[in-house]
Image (cartoon, rainbow, N blue to C red):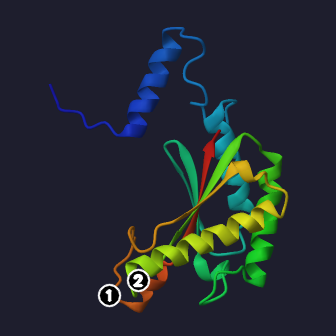
């Protein structure tokens, strides 16, 4: 017998298939892509945001239970400040249109920075970036109870902080779309 490696996503898919084949009340809610359940709603909003942001550098990915949109921080926030840039206000306006169309989702704004200064000050700065973005979305009609602002400083780098390009890649904002 061969050993089988099963990812979390594969396990969820196998559970959904087993539930559907055994006749358990239609399987797992939202297990089908673009289906009626909560994950279908999350994926629809994520893909709508991806489409609205097609003109700017970003990355959108469905990750097990949420959709993640990643945008470089300089596209949203003025350099060295904690206020939205003119381009950032336009981006949030486009995103808010999609967010108002697909309800029963929660959006967590998570800001990251490079490890190039005091870690505490980095945390404070990224928290302020996220708060400015959440305030911008709320001012565009998104219910504040659907929004959360998180700053993580330099705790989760995705690139090396040893080069300017790596540090630039670590300065990012993630929009995590989850079902309510």
Vertical relation: 176 (above or below) 57: above
Q: Which residue: 26% across, 38% down?
A: 5
Mark 2 surroundings: few (<14), some (14-19) or many (≥20) residues within 10 A: some
Residue placed furthest toward the left: 1
Q: Where does the C terminus fall, quadrant-wise?
A: top right
Quarter-of-image position of residue 90: bottom right
* Mark 1 → mark 2, Cα distance in angstroms: 7 Å
State which quadrant residue 130 falls in.
bottom right
Residues at discs 1 and 2 in contact (Cβ within 8 Å): yes
Q: Residue furthest top?
A: 23
In-front residue for pair 47/87: 87
Vertical position of residue 71 compared to residue 178: above or below: below
Give the residue displayed 82% in from the left and 51% down from the top: 100
Residue bearing the label numbered 2: 166
Identify the residue under disc 1.
Answer: 162
Number of disc labels: 2
The residue at 43%/84% (across/down) is 167
Query: Residue at image x 67%, y 77%?
Result: 76
Image: 32 above or below 52:
above
Look at the numbered disc 2 and give the secondary structure of its residue.
helix
Q: Which mark is residue 33?
A: none
């Amino acid at each position: 017998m061969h050993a089988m490696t099963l990812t979390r996503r594969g396990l969820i898919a196998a559970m959904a298939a087993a539930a559907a084949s055994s006749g358990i009340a239609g399987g797992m809610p939202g297990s089908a892509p673009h289906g009626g359940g909560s994950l279908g709603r999350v994926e629809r909003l994520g893909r709508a945001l991806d489409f609205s942001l097609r003109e700017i550098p970003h990355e959108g990915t469905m990750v097990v239970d949420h959709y993640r949109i990643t945008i470089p921080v300089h596209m949203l926030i003025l350099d060295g400040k904690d206020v939205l840039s003119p381009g950032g206000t336009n981006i949030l306006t486009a995103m808010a249109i999609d967010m108002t169309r697909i309800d029963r989702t929660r959006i967590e704004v998570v800001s990251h920075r490079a490890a190039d200064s005091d870690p505490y000050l980095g945390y404070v700065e990224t928290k302020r970036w996220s708060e400015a973005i959440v305030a911008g979305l709320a001012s565009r009609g998104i219910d504040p109870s659907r929004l959360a602002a998180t700053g993580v400083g330099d705790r989760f780098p995705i690139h090396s902080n040893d080069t300017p390009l790596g540090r630039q890649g670590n300065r990012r904002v993630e929009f995590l779309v989850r079902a309510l």
